[in-house]
Image (cartoon, grey):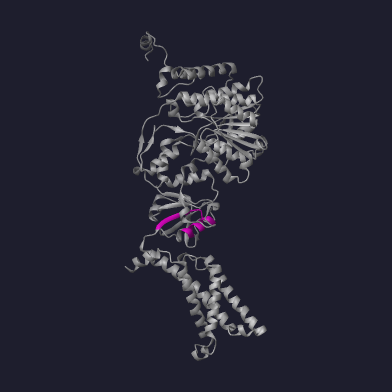
Amino acid sequence: MLRKILNHYANRLVSRWVILIIDLSLVVISFVLAYAIRFNFNIEAMTGHSMGEQLLATSMFYLLGFLIFRPYSGIIRHTSLRDVEHILFATASASGVYLVINLISDLFGVLLVSNYRLPYSILVIHFLVITFSMISIRFFIKSFYFNVVRRKTEPRQVMIYGAGKSGMITKNALEQDDRYKFKVAGFIDDNPSKVGKKLEGIPVFAKKTITNYLLKQLNIAEVIIAIQNIPASKKRAIVDFFLEMDVIIKDIPSTSQWMDGELSTKQIRNIRIEELLERDEIRLDHKNVKAQVADKVVMVTGAAGSIGSEISRQLLYYKPKKLILIDQAESALYELVNDLEHRFNGIVKDRVTTYVCDVCNQVRTDRIFEMHQPNVVYHAAAYKHVPLMEMNPSEAVEVNVLGTKNIVDLAVQYKAENFVLVSTDKAVNPTNIMGASKRIAEMYCQSRQQTETNQTKFITTRFGNVLGSNGSVVPLFKKQIERGGPITITDPRVTRYFMTIPEACELVLEAGAMGNGGEIFVFDMGEQVKIIDLARKMIRLSGYAEHEIAIKTVGLRPGEKLYEEVLSSDENSIETHHPKINIAKVRKHNHHKINDGCGLLLDALLAGNEKALVSQMKKMVPEFISNNSTFEALDRKPHDPFDHVSKRLTGS
């Protein structure tokens, strides 16, 4: 019962003013004790001095020291060396002031001060007693809290991966946590010189010695990665290792994100799936990009989208003369500008110009090009959602094809030096409207490169799914897990390439700077990831067992593939100086033929004939075979009345 009452009141923070009053009470008690020690507890000898005036002066000086250095502001049960420093500064400053008064009285014989003169021996004794008592009481309360009040709950057993400085800081933060009682049962480290030893009484294990039996024996609830700047590949290996053992795995943020330079257990967080899909840091030729962008007028279309906004942020680091941002999404563009102003204080107003504009608006875009004469154009404006575009082919063609054609033609007309098209791996052997529309956009850029009057270098960049982008699978799964499931997947066999937004945009800038014109750059996307494995891992990283969150198969959506490709069957790739960027060897396209094809797309668009529109797309992209779509009928050959005979003869 007593422990319950103590724990109830221990969880309420005592007012700092109450602590200040207690500290002042200690000043008074210590002062009387100092006098008693000085005069061997002889009360008659003590009363012969001006104790009242001296105690009043002492209390005032100590109150001033406490208010300046605030030793009362800390939480008593979390007393640390920093709190000890505050106490020492406060008591030393108060004693120092009194020492000055004594010196004034001794040297100048000031009568007004002489009544307050305190014997040096009492001054020293009081300083030692008050300092010792304030520190001792705080550490006693801290010890009492952790050893008596918190003993009512079973400790949460954890292990820390990393026995370095960050690991020790993590251990200290866990031991001081108010919400839970943690007990660090062991460190795990890859350094042979640390394995087998103890740090503050806690054993250090090698990763290879960690088994299911050991984790169960120690009753380990979770493992915390406490290594700064850990390579992505190593982090993946550690996480996969412990997830296989059904252990919750967490990590700590970088030191730059610690609050007031100290780690809090509130900052220890679950591993995000994005971190496990990242690759090791990409090495970029920043000089190459800077030479293309610095002091140039640079335009970004689709600037408020996931890719366009990150390209815009990265471009500002290279200090372009002017950055022209175009997007039809008003609110998203407003948020981007606010973000840029926060990140690049002082330069956004002078360097950034924004336009709410549709890339299909020929009159408006013409005026923008005429006004700013951009040197470099990054074209990221596009519709990208496969099922939506399958239901709205007219919009896909208007924005992805004709919008791109409009910006490409303006870049040629106003003699832009470079034009970089942001494309997708869905343009390879497309099975949907979105992918086919992006493939036609690629073809138009390539064909425009061959025209006689062209002075612009057209470069296409092609990559896969971007982690965290609007509407991507990872944010969707997160919301579904938060709701308690189920997680919906289209098919257990589906695999996808993944890349982080910063990584993709860095490669776009690098490819754009290295291109000579007409190339399609494909990025090294690593290994394809099974979506069902991604879902299972996200469930476990969120602290749930797989049986707690259901996974439901809903079937492929219109136009979706089981597997993505970065090169078509008739394409090969050429290596570049950058290990993650290759050039796709593709067939060349006649500009007049592609331009005429775009004219037919426009005719079908204006006529509102979606069947004719998609048929024309399939003529321009012969490899475009619809999948799980209403447009599959357009891929069927006319019925042959003798077809059943030929099938019987061939046994098919």
Measured from the top left, where is residue 598 in percent x and y? 54, 19
In the rendered image, the quadrant that contains the N terminus is bottom left
Residue at image position (44%, 18%) is 611
From the top left corner, tell me how far across and down residue 642 is, in percent.
37, 8
Q: Is residue 26 visible?
A: yes
Q: Is residue 500 visible?
A: no
Residue at far left of view: 1
Q: Position of residue 170 (x, y in %)?
A: 49, 56
Q: Nearer the viewer, residue 72 or 323?
A: 323
Residue 159: within the magenta? yes
Which residue ends up furthest to the top in the rendered image?
642
Quadrant assignment, res 506: top right
The residue nearer to you, when weighing 158 against 347, is 347
First to last magenta residue range:
156-173
Tell how many labels. Answer: 0
The structure residue drawn at horizontal position 51% and vertical position 75%, both measured from the top left corner, is 132
* Residue 509 position (above or below residue 245): above
Which quadrant is the C terminus positioned in? top left
Q: Splitting the image into 4 quarters, where does residue 320 fall?
A: top right
As for residue 154 lying within the magenta part, the answer is: no
The correct choice, above or below, for 122 with respect to 331 in the image is: below
Relative side of 607 to 641, left or right = right
Q: Position of residue 607 (x, y in %)?
A: 47, 17
